[in-house]
Image (cartoon, helix red, strand yellow):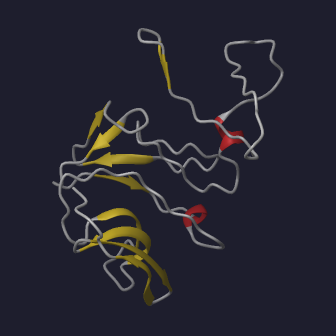
Amino acid sequence: KYDGTTGRLIAWVRIPSLTSGTDYTLRMIYGNPQDGNNYTTDSTWNLRYKGVWHLEDTNDETVYNNDGSAQGDPVVTSSGKIGDAYDFDADGDYIKIDDDATLDITSKITLSAWIRPESIDPWVRILDKSHTSYSNPYSMYGILFQGQNIRLNLSQTTVQGLFFKRERQQNML
């Protein structure tokens, strides 16, 4: 994302590996139609990434196009950690992403989210893949608040398990 008025640039880059103790030169190439390389979002977020949402909008950056839709009335704001972000007002705001087989757990999984809560309510979901019906297990996988703790939840068939729990070490607000 480039702001021509301020000159501010926000860019996501993919560097396969860097070694500490070694100097590197990184070059940024843009706006050159004679550059034969294909620097695209699809080559950055390859097939191993099942969904990437930066939440400057609800679009998935991967080749799977698991785009979402804003529910309630979340507001896009420029106060995100990197670029724009959504402000959810705790009154039914969320991003809905339709179920897709690419979002099922079939091997290793990494879930991550950057959040800045103004308050913490119990059982608020940060990221969650849920059943479409109200049945156990309620969450297939997700990151949520359980009281004042952050909980990672993973489930198989009808067995729901808590695999990670970090007790609140300090005031999260």
The image quadrant of residue 48 is bottom right
Query: Residue, x 58% and y 35% (percent of image)?
Result: 12
Q: Is residue 54 above or below residue 103?
A: above
Q: Locate residue 170 relative to residue 31 in the image: left or right.
A: left
Q: Locate residue 94 relative to residue 141 in the image: left or right.
A: left
Depth check: 5 or 173 in front? 173
Depth check: 84 or 69 in front? 84
Name the outermost residue toward the front.
21
Give the image location of residue 39, x and y in percent: 72, 30
Query: Residue, x 17% and y 57% (percent of image)?
Result: 119
Depth check: 55 or 115 in front? 115
Name the outermost residue toward the bottom.
159
The image quadrant of residue 140 is bottom left
For the C terminus, the image quarter is bottom left
Name the outermost residue toward the right.
36
Q: Locate residue 161 relative to residue 17 in the image: left or right.
A: left
Q: Is residue 161 above or below residue 64?
A: below
Q: Is residue 23 above or below residue 90?
A: above
The image quadrant of residue 104 is bottom right
Number of marks in picture: 0
Depth check: 21 or 90 in front? 21
Q: Is residue 117 above or below residue 105?
A: above
Give the image location of residue 116, x and y in percent: 29, 50
Give the image location of residue 58, x and y in percent: 42, 42
Give the image location of residue 82, x and y in percent: 43, 36
